[in-house]
Image (tube, rainbow, N blue to C red):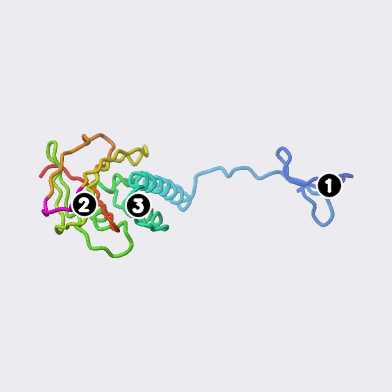
């Protein structure tokens, strides 16, 4: 640390030096540079966690955008927090190495698929036909629900690329409800690499989703 005398008081960083006043005297020292060398294990883990956290948050955002109209009807101002927690949990099921795990990878696993199916976007209790399974074959999707219902509802096809933040959505409307526990709809979207195919059931006060699986 160096000291020098001047008629003017200087403070702050100038070039590669930091100027400040200590005990009434002007002091100058060399600015600290970036630390060189390998990161500690703890630092590496934080970097990997932050990377995955950012991806999960982005995935939650695109999912909320895809079903924004349906979410608005639920009138839950803190729903985004629950969705973000869901995304982080889904990411944890991805078998890839830390730092490379994604929500899409988690949804490719049985545990991830079960977690999504068990998640209710609505917070208040609601009786509705819960999605039990959704499987595609050819141009059709066979959807199994827990019960019949005469309440107006929609079955939504949602195709999302979580990494690129893009989506497509199509609504199959059932104004008179669902009269059978097994529903077959015509597929609107072909399978695309990098995209996750979901089906969601939406109505007054409820919203639930499930991954569309191959063949039946």
Magenta span: helix, strand or loop, mainly?
loop
* Front residue of 121 and 155: 155
Question: In the image as oriented, which residue stretches furthest toward the bottom?
Answer: 125
What residue span does the magenta drawing correspond to? 174-182
Residue density around tag 3, few if under 14, some if 14–19, many if 20 or more, within 10 Å: many
Secondary structure under the numbered disc 3 in the rendered image: helix
Dot 2, how many residues are within 10 Å of its Cα: few (below 14), some (14-19), or many (20+)?
few
List x then y, in percent, for residue 34: 59, 43
As drawn, the residue found furthest toward the right would be 7
Q: Is residue 49 magenta?
A: no
What residue does disc 2 label? Answer: 110
Q: Residue 90 appears at what percent x and percent y?
A: 31, 52
- Tally of marks: 3
Element at label 1: loop
Q: Position of residue 199 (x, y in %)?
A: 23, 47
Quote the CA–CA distance across marks 2 and 3.
Answer: 26 Å
Q: Mark 1 = which residue?
A: 9
Say if 102 sits above or below 193 in the image.
Answer: below
Mark number, residue 71: 3
Which tag is nearer the camera, tag 1 or tag 3?
3
**Is residue 118 shown above or below 109?**
below
Residue 6, position as x, y percentages in the image: 87, 44
Q: Is residue 94 left or right of residue 26?
A: left
């Amino acid at each position: 640390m160096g000291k020098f005398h001047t008629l003017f008081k200087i403070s702050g960083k100038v070039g590669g030096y930091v100027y400040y006043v200590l005990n009434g005297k002007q002091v100058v020292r060399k600015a600290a540079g970036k630390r060189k060398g390998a990161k500690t294990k703890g630092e590496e883990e934080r970097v990997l966690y932050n990377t995955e956290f950012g991806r999960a948050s982005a995935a939650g955002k695109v999912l909320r955008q895809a079903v924004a109209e349906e979410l608005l009807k639920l009138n839950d101002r803190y729903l985004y927090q629950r969705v973000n927690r869901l995304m982080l949990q889904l990411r944890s099921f991805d078998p890839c190495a830390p730092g490379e795990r994604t929500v899409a990878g988690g949804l490719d696993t049985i545990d991830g698929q079960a977690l999504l199916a068990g998640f209710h976007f609505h917070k208040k209790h609601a009786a509705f036909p819960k999605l039990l399974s959704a499987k595609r074959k050819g141009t059709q999707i066979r959807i199994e629900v827990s019960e019949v219902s005469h309440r107006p509802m929609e079955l939504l096809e949602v195709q999302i690329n979580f990494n690129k933040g893009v989506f497509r959505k199509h609504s199959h409307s059932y104004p008179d409800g669902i009269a059978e526990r097994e529903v077959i709809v015509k597929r609107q979207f072909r399978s695309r690499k990098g995209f996750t195919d979901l089906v969601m059931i939406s109505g007054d006060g409820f919203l639930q989703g499930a991954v569309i699986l191959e063949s039946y």
